Amino acid sequence: MSTLTIHPADMDQETAIRLFLDALHVNYKTSEKETDETEYLSASPAMKEHLNKAVQQDKNNEGSQVSLDDIWK
């Protein structure tokens, strides 16, 4: 295997690269401090919108509960 070093120009590029690697199930590590998951997901405008919607639904008790047994069905 070879090692790739990638230098994204901004957070949008970094997010796109991470999402692409995740979709391909490619393991990777970063040399800088890891961002927390909320910060990482919020970097994408579309994901930020989904997170905000989910938070609002939770505040309005509009969520649904799924038992662990039903998750894999």
Image (spheres, rainbow, N blue to C red):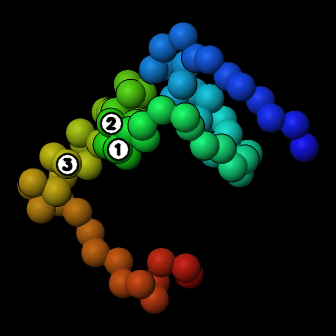
Check the image and name the residue furthest to the top: 9
* In-front residue for pair 71/36: 36
Q: Are marks 2 and 1 in contact (CB under 8 Å)?
A: yes
Question: Can residue 23 be seen?
Answer: no
- Residue at image mark 2: 39
Check the image and name the residue furthest to the bottom: 69
Check the image and name the residue furthest to the right: 1
Q: Residues within 10 Å of mark 3 (few under 14, many from 20)?
A: some
Q: How many marks?
A: 3
For label 1, the SS is loop
Dividing the picture into quarters, in which one does residue 23 lie? top right
Report the amino acid beneath label 2.
Glu
Q: Residue at x 26, y 49 (%)?
A: 54
Report the amino acid beneath label 3.
Val
Q: Residues within 10 Å of mark 2 (few under 14, many from 20)?
A: few
Report the amino acid beneath label 1.
Asp
Q: Which mark is residue 36?
A: 1
Residue 64 located left or right of residue 33: left
Dividing the picture into quarters, in which one does residue 41 lie? top left
Q: Earlier in the sequence, mark 1 or mark 3?
A: 1
Is residue 12 shown above or below 49?
above
The residues tagged by marks 2 and 1 sit, at their Cα atoms, a distance apart of 5 Å
Percent x, y of residue 25: 71, 51
Residue 4 located left or right of residue 21: right
Residue 54 located left or right of residue 70: left
Q: Earlier in the sequence, mark 2 or mark 3?
A: 2
Percent x, y of residue 20: 66, 35
* In-front residue for pair 68/3: 3
Q: Which mark is residue 55?
A: 3
For label 3, the SS is helix
Q: Residues within 10 Å of mark 1 (few under 14, many from 20)?
A: few
The residues tagged by marks 2 and 3 sit, at their Cα atoms, a distance apart of 15 Å
